[in-house]
Image: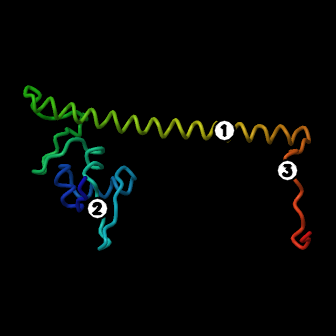
Amino acid sequence: MALLDLTTAAKMAGVSRQTIYRKMSEGAISWDIDKQGKRRIETSELMRVFGPLNSHGENLRDVTNNTVRHNTETVEGYQIAIDSLKSQVESERQRALRAESEVDFLRSALSKAQDDVQKMLTHQTDTNTTPSRPWWKFW
């Protein structure tokens, strides 16, 4: 996807530059910094946050009720709605996979911590550990 400067991104999303800056500071939009040190936003990020975009600066999404504002009587309107929903489903699927892997990691960490606490409470030591040699003993 293309990287856009903030002014162009705001026009394509149909919002003000202040809204873009606010979303960036809230962490809702990620951005990259180009070689000149200027912030750039990918169009996919804009679509993820603001919905379908228009190159004429008209946002196809009604911000007040989070619905797509276009003529759904045409095939093109339906296709835009389908594409928007597909991208939303894919981003939610990726989010769910990340959350699931984080839950698995936390479960394993909790299980290890519970084992360690149990060993401490019963004064058990781990039999797999070998005592470390002092650094001055080379043999």
Badge 2 vs badge 1, beta-carbon distance below 8 Å? no
Name the residue type under label 2: Arg
SS state under label 3: loop
Name the residue type under label 1: Ser
Horizontal side of 138 relative to 35 (left or right) equals right
Question: Residue extending furthest front?
Answer: 139
Residue located at (45% from left, 35% from top) = 96
> Closer to the camera, 57 or 86?
86
Tell me if mark 3 has few (under 14), some (14-19) or many (20+) residues whose alpha carbon lies within 10 angstroms of its own. few
How far from the left and from the top, in percent, is residue 121?
87, 39
Q: Which residue is mark 1?
A: 108
How far from the left and from the top, in percent, is residue 46?
26, 49
Mark 3 or 1, closer to the camera: 3
Residue located at (16% from left, 54% from top) = 11
Q: What is the spatial separation of the Cα atoms under label 2 and label 1, in whole angstroms? A: 38 Å
Tell me if mark 2 has few (under 14), some (14-19) or many (20+) residues whose alpha carbon lies within 10 angstroms of its own. some
How far from the left and from the top, in percent, is residue 53?
18, 45
Residue located at (20% from left, 39% from top) = 61
Residue located at (9% from left, 51% from top) = 56
Q: Which residue is mark 3?
A: 129
Q: Please say which color scheme the image uses.
A: rainbow
Looking at marks 2 and 3 on the same chain, the residue that comes earlier in the sequence is marked by: 2
> Closer to the camera, 119 or 17?
119
Horizontal side of 123 relative to 83 (left or right) equals right
Q: What is the spatial separation of the Cα atoms under label 2 and label 3, in whole angstroms? A: 51 Å
SS state under label 2: strand
Horizontal side of 122 relative to 47 (left or right) equals right
- Quadrant hosting residue 119: top right
Q: Which residue is mark 2?
A: 40
- Quadrant hosting residue 21: bottom left
Mark 2 or 1, closer to the camera: 1
In the picture shown, does residue 73 fall above or below 51? above
